[in-house]
Amino acid sequence: MAHRTITVLPGDGVGPEVTEQALEVLLTVADLYRHDFTVHRRLAGLAAIAEEGVAISDETFDLCAGSDAILFGAIGSLPAEQRKNATVRPEQALFRLRKDFQFFANLRPIRPSRSLYHASPLKPEYLDGTDLIFVRELSAGLYYGHLDAAIPGKPSEIRRTERGEEAVDTLLYTEQEIERVVRAAFDIAAARRGKITSVDKANVLSSSILWRRIVDRIAPDYPGVEYEHILVDAAAMFLLRDPARFDVVVTENLFGDILTDEAAMLTGSIGMIPSASLGVRRTEAGVFGLYEPIHGSAPDIEGQDRANPIGAVLSAAMLLRHSLGLPEEAAAVEAAVEEVLADGFRTVDISEDGAKLVGTRELGKRIATAVRRP
Ligand code: IPM
Ligand code: MN
């Protein structure tokens, strides 16, 4: 029996709805396998701003620090007119967690399920054999350029000059920041099909030239892994033309953000994709991490029991595997998702003629019920 602590930050929009289902699945696992999970629930994002005045409070942050893992829902955004010069913004919760816990490796697996080929805009013959994982750098790059006082420019800060308004974002990567994520990606490739694609824009950006140089330097340490460099524009094309060519894809923060939304459509819906953000601290049986579906807060369908909980549930499976050191339990959750899909149950985003259309809660409940101990 394992005793573990999980801090749950459901966040905004559909975040609480999908996280509820992921939590239900985790508690089912605890029950079946006789583990003892302590769960703390706290606010983050818009919800925290409304109640506590900040996107994430110090108390919540400290609670996360003392946990084995963080289960995260989704973060909302301020309406455009409020966003302009707001100093408190919901995204700050995510950025603080990612930066301060050094969650530098963001894993986003893309494995289209055969039973959902119909939901993808791609023809089925393009999807066959697709099984890839993105390793997105998550703690540096354009998202954080403003943190170094020596660098000009803050996101959302627009300044007035004699030329009119202007704004600047800074893309900075240090050698260490690149090296640690590239090594993590090579380690993952070595344990998979042994192929890695590094995505950059080295024909334009200095940070990409450095990135490429570091990949070339690390590659000889992994003789069993075949590697290649691809420019980000070409990568966007290959993801649609021949997704099965990829095994592990490693890239910087913003490229990874964009390409993973694109790649999500191979599975039929962005609601399907989980993620793990892994850092440096070891837990008792794994590594401290944050787990969240890659979709946003989807305020347009909030409170309607329509959101797809599978991305959140599969994030919980990744939590079991990477932070709690419970791979058998993780596999049981993934098998339960496949079983429920094979039985024809669908939320609206992945539905088809003749499917059994169900809501967030029912799909979550069916997955939890399908989790079995072998
Ligand atoms: C993601 C999201 C975030 C990001 C947003 C909410 C800031 O899109 O996790 O992919 O851009 O990293
Ligand atoms: Mn994104």
Image (spheres, rainbow, N blue to C red):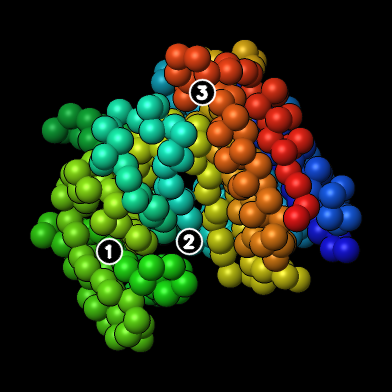
Numbered disc in front, either 1 or 2: 1
The residue that disc 3 covers is: 298
The residue that disc 2 covers is: 105
The residue that disc 1 covers is: 198
Q: Does residue 371 appear in the picture of this structure?
A: yes
> Residue at the spot x=31%, y=42% of the render?
127
| Kind of residue sitting beneath label 2 | Ala
> Residue at the spot x=63%, y=18% of the render?
359
Looking at the image, do the residues carrying marks 3 and 2 touch, with CB atoms under 8 Å apart?
no
Q: Which is nearer the N-term, disc 1 or disc 2? A: 2
> Residue at the spot x=64%, y=67% of the render?
287
| Mark 1 secondary-structure assignment | strand
Left or right? Give the position of 203 relative to 351. Answer: left
Q: Position of residue 199 (x, y in %)?
A: 25, 59
Q: Does residue 184 appear in the picture of this structure?
A: no
**Quadrant of the rendered structure where residue 231 is?**
bottom left
Mark 3: few/some/many CA within 10 Å (<14, 14-19, 20+): some
Does residue 246 sit above or below 95 in this rendering?
below
Q: Position of residue 97 (x, y in %)?
A: 59, 51
Disc 3/disc 2 C-alpha distance (Å):
25 Å
Mark 1: few/some/many CA within 10 Å (<14, 14-19, 20+): many
346 vs 14, nearest the viewer: 346
| Kind of residue sitting beneath label 3 | Ala
| Mark 2 secondary-structure assignment | strand
Q: Which is nearer the N-term, disc 3 or disc 1? A: 1
